[in-house]
Amino acid sequence: MKDIKQRITTTLGALLVLFTAGVAGYAIIEKWDFLDSLYMTVITLATIGYGEVHPLSQGGRIFTIFLILGGIGTMTYIFSSITALLIEGELKDVFRRLKMQNRLENIKDHYIVCGATHAGISICEELRNTDRPFVLVVIKDEEVKKFMEAGYCAVAGDASTDEVLLKCSLLKARGIFCALKNDKDNAFIALTARGIVQGIKIVTVQNENDPKMQDKLARSGADIVVSPSHIGGLRMVSEMTRPATVQFLDSMMRGKSVNCRFEDIEAGPGADGKPLAAFKGADREGALVVAVKSGEDGGYEINPLPSRIVKKSEVLVALGTPDEIKRLRALLG
């Protein structure tokens, strides 16, 4: 696109040079004044075919021939560049939409983020940083192009409708984030998603500081309701009273320079009845299991012993490098 724009700029500059050369040429060769020289240059380059201002000398006719050829070549180049610009833009949009449609058809185990709000974009960035696939739902078509250019998988439409959610492959999704600015809209999205897929996990933002709104969002189908103002208050206290702990957790969870991550890993059938020590490598190295969430009471067992027996569907909170986490996830599958 930049190359074509550069071509147009260059050819417009060439056209300006032709006009200047035409006026100067007629003024020098035919000794005409500025207005007559400009008029003759315009009708020559425009190939209008009006009569000559004054009879041309042999030198003037030769000059006119070269001026016509230069004008035709320059104008042809300009129009071809403009046409290429238009066609390339349309083709890019077509290929971009086909590529997006293909991604939507093949995506699975992903997350749906509803709303390009500040919260929604933060969610997308965190998902992208942790290599989790997602689809962003925006309102306007113009926004889709912007986010697609940024590498997002994006869809335009009303996220509270069955059509849009199904277009985002809701049936194959892991969960859905409701991040719009209006809590009622978030409630409608949660209600619609829950009606389509009963067991899908739904997390919604609560914008209003009304305690009743949290209950309404929960009743609409949200599993978890997050209040930014409440979370922000807790974060401020933590920053004041235990800054080192907060910075450590931030670096583990979101730091780009740190090669360790906290991850939740659910134990599969193959892990049932085995001790935690069985999931370490031969060198006894690997991801560190810092806690186990029991499926019975939902409580956490902190710093479990290596002899601790793992049960199916329990969730292990592990700390390790991406490779260590991947290996542990495979062993627990």
Image: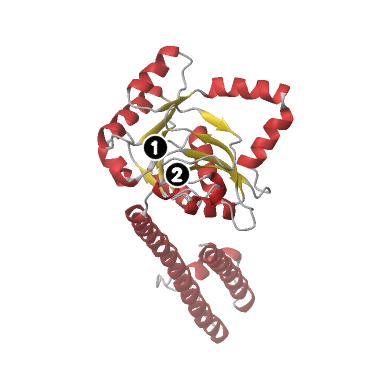
Give the total of numbered labels: 2
Image position, residue 31 (x, y; %): 62, 74
Which dot marks residue 31?
none
Q: Which residue is mark 2?
A: 273
Amino acid at dot 1:
Ile
The residue mark sitting in front, 1 or 2, is: 2
Residue 36 makes an appearance in the image: no
Image position, residue 164 (x, y; %): 30, 41
At x 65%, y 37%, the residue is 250
Q: Is residue 316 left or right of residue 200?
A: right
Say whether disc 1 or disc 2 marks the residue closer to the N-terminus.
1
Q: Where 304 falls versus 287 (above or below)?
A: above
The answer to which quarter of the image holds residue 218 is top left
Q: Which residue is mark 1?
A: 176
User: Which is nearer the eye, 69 or 254?
Assistant: 254
The crowding category of the residue bearing disc 1, from other C-alpha atoms within 10 Å (few below 14, some 14 to 19, many at least 20), is many
- Mark 1–mark 2 distance (CA, rounded to whole Å): 33 Å
At x 65%, y 50%, the residue is 259
Image position, residue 254 (x, y; %): 61, 41
Q: Where 130 falls versus 40 (above or below)?
A: above
The crowding category of the residue bearing disc 2, from other C-alpha atoms within 10 Å (few below 14, some 14 to 19, many at least 20), is few
Q: Is residue 177 left or right of residue 324?
A: left
